[in-house]
Amino acid sequence: MMLYYYIYGRLMSATILALRARLDRFGVLLSGLCLLHCLAGLFLVGILGLGGSALLDPAIHRFGLIAAVVVGASTIGLGALRHGRMLPLAVGTFGLILMASAVIVGHGSAEAVLTICGVLLVASAHVINMRSGC
């Protein structure tokens, strides 16, 4: 019976680690897509004057922030609990704060800078979290 619990515990631990790693990779992908959206928006709207209503819709930014908070907080937070390192949690939290500030500030260059910096920090936190896996 002891062997069963040992094997079950190891299997569950491996499953949780695999899920967390997948979610961290998804977080990096989500951050990359957000960065691409921001840069494409700056280029298409600022330089070419195209797609302003679709790319600059505030609903997209609010949805992106909610997705970033859900994925980032769950994976980075669970990772910090698992491996005990607070660096990914601190970096990710600061990145999410910058992203939330960008939504509050509204459209403009300040929003772009805050969003890009926030996204880069959240993506970095996911990468640090993946490398800190135990």
Image: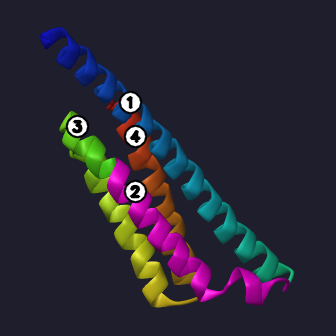
Q: Amino acid at mark 4?
A: Arg
3D distance between C-alphas at marks 4 and 2: 11 Å
| Left or right of 78, for residue 17 | right
Q: Which residue is mark 2?
A: 72
Q: Which residue is mark 3?
A: 82
Residues at circles 3 and 2 in contact by the CB criterion of under 8 Å? no
Taking the spot 18% from the left edge, 19% from the top edge, the residue there is: 5
Return the residue nearer the eye: 11 or 120.
11
Q: Residues within 10 Å of mark 2 (few under 14, many from 20)?
A: many
Q: Secondary structure at mark 3?
A: helix
Q: Which mark is residue 20?
A: 4
Task: Indicate which disc, 1 or 3, sits on the residue closer to the N terminus.
Answer: 1
Task: Indicate which disc, 1 or 2, sits on the residue closer to the N terminus.
Answer: 1
Return the residue nearer the eye: 11 or 33.
11
Residue 28 at what x, y percent from top left?
A: 53, 48
Residue range of the region highlighted in magenta in the rendering? 49-75
Compared to 115, does 79 lie above or below?
above
3D distance between C-alphas at marks 1 and 2: 19 Å
3D distance between C-alphas at marks 4 and 1: 9 Å
Q: Which residue is mark 1?
A: 15
Q: Residues within 10 Å of mark 4 (few under 14, many from 20)?
A: many
